[in-house]
Image (cartoon, helix red, strand yellow):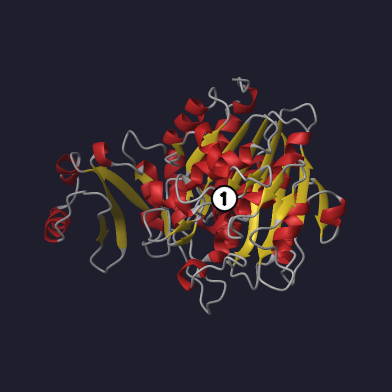
Amino acid sequence: MSAILVKQEEITASENVIPIYVVRDNEWPQFKLSLSESHIKFSEIQKFSAKTDQKLCLTSSDGEILSVIFGAGSKSTDDLGAMRAGGLSASLPSGFYRFSLLPKDWKQDLAIVGWGAGAYKFEEYLPTETIFPTLVIDQYDKLEEIRSTVDAIHLCRNLINTPANDMGPDALGETVIKIAELHGAAIKITKGKDLITEKYPMVHAVGRAAHEEPRLVEFEWGETSHPRLAIVGKGITFDTGGLNIKSAAGAKIMKKDMGGAAHALALSKMIMANNLPVRLHCLIAIAENSISAGAYRPGDILTSRSGLTIEIDNTDAEGRLVLADALTKASELEPNLIMDFATLTGAARVALGPTLPPFYCNREAPVSSVLEHSKKQKDPMWHMPLWQQYNQMLISPIADMKNAGGGFAGSITAALFLEKFVNAQPWMHFDVYGWCPTSYPGHPKGGDMFAVRSLYHWIKSGGLNSNLSI
């Protein structure tokens, strides 16, 4: 990753650094006057007018690129803002470039993040490696923080994109351990039958049919005097649906069902890499929802860590079960805030599509601030209600609740289910998809990260010290 973002002093003085000019469509007529007559004619032949994502490479007589002009279109319709720079790093030939002009409303740090986010391709199983262009940064004190952001994006994507035969419970667990060890965190692993004796019965039930043992991997980092933040991730490394088996189409990309864990790890890594004043407790609930003689069944009643009993209405609603035990553990330490990430419901995709994750919170006070950071970072999310009336959909006649609420309001009922396990602690839930079905600037097709950048900046700005009591 470091090769795509470098400081000026990290390259030799003889390297040719190509300037990039990002221009709004209404600024183009004036900007065009600064070009040579031949380049003006070339731009006209190419019908370049600085419309959104248009790119114009101006060359010398021998074909060498002299400069790049990138269209930012109209400000009123530029929903991605500076993250559009990802379209440049994904398409320009290798070489060194620098931003010489950006629209006044584009933040430089976002443009750099966008560049880093766009310079990505999952090639672990291919014989060749793409050489992406390098962005040269002049005297910018935020570069190391931005590098950690881009590193987190790539980490999240790599984890999600890696197929389940190489990213099963063992491999995902080892990844959590490596990240924790890198930052000197204290690690605890509970797996296999120990999940029963240590009172994580639902993590065990969901994963007991798989050939690799289920586990809860958790780590703590930071000073005990700092605000305590618990980050919980759903790590279902492959989801067959269990005995309520998925269709072929539904199972096709279920390697991504550990996307919540990938998001939780990415945020945790950013916090630790930048030494934020946080007492971090990260909990990753890991299992493969498989099918064998030992699989849990529809109609079973499980007793959770909290003591609540759950009737299994659908074995394909397994993520909320492993999260429930992890959330209960997190709440026992009375953190200032619990956040959880999960590729939890198809209902969220029906409501909001793949790239706009719903955000639930059992406190009103922090919502507007979180959404404001989402807007600033061009990292969208949508606040959804914990509509208490829908708890009736989770009623079971033979247990404290069911694990699924039927066909209506599926994302809300899943959030209501999880809410029962946070013991009234301040809590946020993010129902992420973790996947881009089609590419757009800064977001190549495949595994992807959502909401994490916004939350990092909210935490950095003192979000944990704000009023979380109401």
How far from the left and from the top, in percent, is residue 116?
48, 53
How many numbered marks have been drawn onto this rendered protein structure?
A: 1
Residue 360 in view in this figure: yes
In the image, taking residue 17 as reference, residue 345 lies left or right, namely right
Q: Which residue is at the front of the view, 327 or 375? A: 327
Q: Residue type at mark 1?
A: Ala
How far from the left and from the top, in percent, is residue 414?
56, 45
Q: Which residue is at the front of the view, 46 or 368? A: 368
- Which residue is painted at 64% across and 44% down in the image? 401
Q: Which residue occupies the extreme front position in the image?
A: 397
In the image, taking residue 59 as reference, residue 153 lies left or right, namely right
The quadrant where residue 254 appears = bottom right
- Which residue is painted at 30% across and 45% down in the image? 22
- Which residue is painted at 60% across and 31% down in the image? 460
Helix, strand or loop for disc 1: loop
How far from the left and from the top, in percent, is residue 387?
50, 33
The quadrant where residue 75 appears = top left
* Above or below: residue 425 compared with residue 191: above
Residue holding disc 1:
404
